[in-house]
Image (cartoon, grey):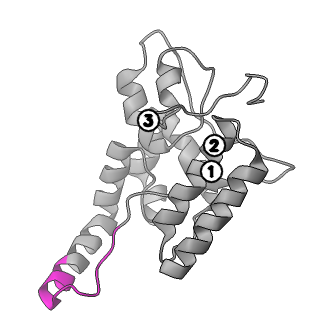
């Protein structure tokens, strides 16, 4: 589809929404976090919606990600205590619902997802429903030392194949060499 022009990649800015806003594409795949941007940026005469990704050979799949919250081992006792209090605050039902409504992400707890307030929000904001429906078949990339380097190299290889028409053999061969170097560095 890329070769015959019936599909394109996100483009140099990395966001499929840019071409969508400009009416240059019928649809795109992106994050639920973009819903607020879509609501603010989409021309008023453009009626749009969201849905889960299509299945492939009967299997559904959706990558899950979000804002990462970490605590470093080197943190002082008071910093760890403060971080724990902050995480507890973020995980509270009221706060995680508020966060989800403002960001387009899904509430962090199942009880918040099922809460009457959040369910009422979904009724009033049907574009938020696809992300919730996708949870049952979602996956998350495993974390490991050097992941960011790996992910960047992988995306570069995919970009070479899709946008620059580099052969898979060449792009994946280069990726294999890069990963080998990363493995020895980490």
Of tags 1 and 3, the one toward the viewer is: 1
Examine the rendered structure and indicate whether residue 21 appears above or below residue 31.
above
Pinpoint residue 146: horizontal percent, then vertical percent: 48, 72
Hey, which residue is sitting farthest right in the picture? 57
Mark 2 and mark 1 residues within 8 Å of each other at the beta carbon? yes
Comparing marks 2 and 3, which lies closer to the viewer? Answer: 2
Q: With 56 as the anchor, is 81 left or right in this view?
A: left
Q: Which numbered disc flags the more N-terminal residue, 1 or 3?
A: 3
Residue 167 lies left or right of residue 83; in this view the side is right
Tell me the magenta residue range: 69-82
Q: Is residue 64 visible?
A: no
| Numbered circle sitting on residue 160 | 2
Indicate whether residue 112 is drawn in magenta: no
Helix, strand or loop at mark 3: helix
Is-magenta flag for residue 80?
A: yes
Q: Quadrant of the N terminus?
A: top right
Comes first in the chain, label 2 or label 3 = 3
Residue displayed at 49% across by 38% down: 14
Q: Secondary structure at mark 2?
A: helix
Q: Label for residue 35?
A: 3
Residue situated in front as seen by the camera: 145 or 112: 145
The residue wearing badge 1 is 157
- Please say if 97 is above or below 122: below
- Report crowding for label 2: few under 14, some 14 to 19, many 20 or more residues within 10 A (C-alpha): some
- Image coords of residue 40 (percent x, y): 35, 25
Q: Position of residue 141 (x, y in %)?
A: 58, 66
């Amino acid at each position: 589809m890329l070769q015959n022009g019936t599909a394109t990649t996100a483009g140099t800015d990395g966001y499929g929404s840019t071409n969508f806003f400009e009416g240059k594409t019928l649809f795109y795949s992106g994050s639920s976090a973009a819903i607020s941007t879509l609501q603010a940026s989409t021309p008023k005469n453009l009626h749009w919606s969201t849905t889960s990704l299509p299945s492939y050979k009967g299997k559904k799949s959706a990558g899950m990600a979000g804002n990462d919250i970490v605590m470093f081992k080197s943190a002082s006792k008071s910093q760890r205590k403060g971080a724990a209090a902050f995480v507890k605050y973020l995980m509270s039902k009221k706060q995680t619902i508020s966060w989800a409504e403002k960001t387009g992400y899904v509430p962090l707890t199942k009880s918040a997802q099922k809460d009457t307030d959040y369910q009422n929000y979904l009724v009033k904001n049907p574009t938020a429903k696809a992300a919730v429906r996708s949870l049952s078949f979602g996956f998350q990339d495993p974390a490991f030392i050097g992941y960011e380097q790996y992910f960047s190299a992988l995306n570069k290889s995919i970009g070479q194949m899709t946008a620059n028409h580099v052969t898979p053999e060449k792009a994946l061969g280069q990726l294999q060499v890069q990963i080998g170097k990363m493995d020895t560095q980490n």
